[in-house]
């Protein structure tokens, strides 16, 4: 079973809705969220204030799990939030687990 990390970047307006939605998903064991800033040339999606600052405040979610489950989660997100402007990337994980003083097997 191949493990991966699904990273989602969402608008602040969508944050609470996505927290609730992720908590309802049976195949999501847990996730992490942090405030981040997006930078780029997509000026049309930025307010005047964001254009002046050169950044847009966002929330980033990270979900660790099996690739097949995360791909299923992406399909569900496409149906639930089709025009929400979600951005994602799915990255393979080489190693993960708790730090205990013992080597993982």
Image: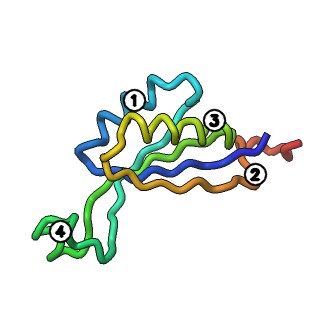
> Eyeballing the image, is 43 above or below 7?
below
> Looking at the image, is mark 2 or mark 3 nearer the viewer?
3
Q: How is the image coloured?
A: rainbow
Query: Disc 3 to disc 1, how far (Cα)?
Result: 15 Å
Query: Disc 3 to disc 4, how far (Cα)?
Result: 35 Å
> Looking at the image, is mark 2 or mark 1 nearer the viewer?
1
Which x, y percent locates residue 40? Answer: 33, 74
> Eyeballing the image, is 38 above or below 65?
below
Query: Under tag 2, what secondary structure?
Result: loop
> Looking at the image, is mark 2 or mark 4 nearer the viewer?
4
Q: Earlier in the sequence, mark 2 or mark 4?
A: 4
Q: Earlier in the sequence, mark 3 or mark 1?
A: 1
| Label 2 close to label 1 by CB (< 8 Å) | no
Residue located at (44% from left, 38% from top): 77
Q: Looking at the image, which residue sits at the far right?
A: 105
Q: Of the numbered discs in the image, which one, if any, rests on residue 95?
A: 2
Query: Disc 2 to disc 4, how far (Cα)?
Result: 37 Å
- Give the residue pinned by disc 3: 69
Which x, y percent locates residue 76? Answer: 48, 34
Q: Of the numbered discs in the image, which one, if any, rests on residue 50?
A: 4
Give the left or right position of residue 104, taking residue 25 as reference: right
């Amino acid at each position: 079973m191949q493990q991966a990390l699904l990273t989602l970047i969402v608008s602040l307006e969508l944050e609470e809705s996505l927290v609730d939605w992720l908590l309802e998903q049976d195949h999501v064991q847990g996730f992490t969220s942090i405030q981040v800033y997006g930078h780029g040339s997509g000026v049309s999606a930025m307010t005047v204030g964001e254009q002046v600052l050169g950044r847009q405040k966002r929330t980033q979610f990270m979900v660790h799990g099996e690739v097949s489950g995360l791909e299923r989660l992406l399909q569900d997100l496409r149906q639930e939030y089709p025009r929400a402007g979600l951005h994602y990337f799915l990255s393979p994980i080489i190693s993960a687990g708790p730090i205990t003083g013992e080597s993982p097997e």
